[in-house]
Image (spheres, rainbow, N blue to C red):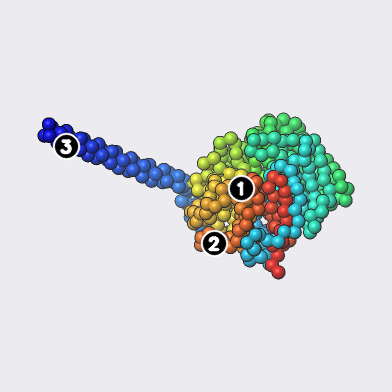
Amino acid sequence: MRRQGIDHHGQCIRKGAGSLSLCLSLLLLLVIAGLTAYVLFEKDWAKSEIDDTRLNELSNTALPEAGSSTGDWPQWRGPKRDGVSSEKGLLAAWPADGPKELWRQPAGKGYSTLAVSRGRVFTVFQDGDSEAVCSWDAETGKELWRFRYPARYVNGYGNGPRSTPTIAGDLLYAVGGTGMMHCLKAFTDNPAGEKVWRRDLLSDFGAKNLQWGVSFSPLVEGDLVYTNPGGPNGHSLAALDKKTGATEWTSQDDPAGYSSPLSATTAGERQVVFFTGSGLVAVTPDAGKLLWRYPWETAFGANIATPIVVEDYVFISSGYNRGCTVVKVEKSDSGFEARRVYENKRMRTHFSTCVRYQDCLFGFDDTTLICMEFRTGKVLWDQRDFGKGSLLVADGNLVILGETGLVALAEATPAGYREISRFTFSEGRCWSVPVVANGRMYIRDEEKVVCYDVRRQ
């Protein structure tokens, strides 16, 4: 019995050792397989599609420095729609609880950011069953007028308007979440506001609303205001007379995107560039004639970020694992063509837009803030504190707003993430881009707008 017991015990030990060895072997195989898959995944994830000739051309091309005029911020992303303010004399660091608050005003639902012009601040938000375009005094926050009109956009990812007003001369142009567009007198003293003209973009151009609402901010240049209703049968893009709202031309069949158009002189010709639901499209300003197109399909048609145009080069990026590309616009005897320089998945901007500064792109690769070389697509550093977010550059620094309300000031440098200050603005959802104009910083969430003094004392 004793011998049998010893044998039985020995067999159990040998069986246990064999099972343990088998488990360790399987575990080792799983680890190796996992590491192999990770390496292959990372290799594929970071893989760039590159045109070596054009990449070499871009690497050796002298490009202008980014930088907008100081002072007012009269439209989406500033005077040049590039997210850069060259304003000087701002605070080099903020107090622990944030800069001095000058004023705050309640604001309803929506993701419209702020336009600042001639001592006034403008935005759009949901006001009960109406949308409201509102104007406040930039110094005191006193409400100057509020123009309300029946419209209510409801969405599980946030209610209310998405578009930022555009100020051009004495007029304001605003688009709501359901496509209602108004031209108003920007500097009126009438507390109810003053309408100049009105268009229903979806109805007038036969378009359906997007999954997350009409979101582009109108562009004004010369005598025209440019829009992207997304209607079929040549009614995707539309230019309106800025004084009357009359349709001057329509063009293309693309589904609408969420991006805002911009104008630029590219390959020697003035162009209006749209990032539609199916790609980049450039047309002539006066007639909407197609100059070139570059297909860019994204899940849900979610092309949201504003293109960045630098001379003959255009950068675009999209979320939903789509990534980014730089194309070069080239002109020949047969016309214009956009050719890819590089493409990768290193900058998957969701609802925000990158900022180009000192040959770098600062922006959100999904939930990670990154710095990427504009010329090569190489990532130089990353920071993961903010979730999804948005930013601008002012006085050489990054002003960063995370979606959960964290606000940070950091150096706009390729050398690494170098944070200077931070504070918590809100516990609500912050999907609106901060604005810096005339020494003041404006931030909003879905409940309020707050103005801070960021002037150096």
Separation of residues labelled 3 and 2 (CA atoms): 62 Å
Residue at 36% x, 42% y is 34
Q: Quadrant of residue 92?
A: bottom right
Residue that mark 1 sits on: 403
Q: Amino acid at mark 3?
A: Gly
Q: Amino acid at mark 1?
A: Glu
The mark that comes first in sequence, 3 or 1, is 3
Residue that mark 3 sits on: 10
In which quadrant of the rendered image does the N terminus lie? top left
Q: How many marks?
A: 3
Q: Point out residue 52 in the picture as x, y percentages from the top left corner.
A: 46, 51
Under tag 1, what secondary structure?
loop
Q: Amino acid at mark 2?
A: Arg
Q: Quadrant of residue 201?
A: top right
Q: Which mark is residue 418?
A: 2
Q: Is residue 133 visible?
A: yes
Q: Point out residue 357 in the picture as x, y percentages from the top left corner.
A: 59, 58
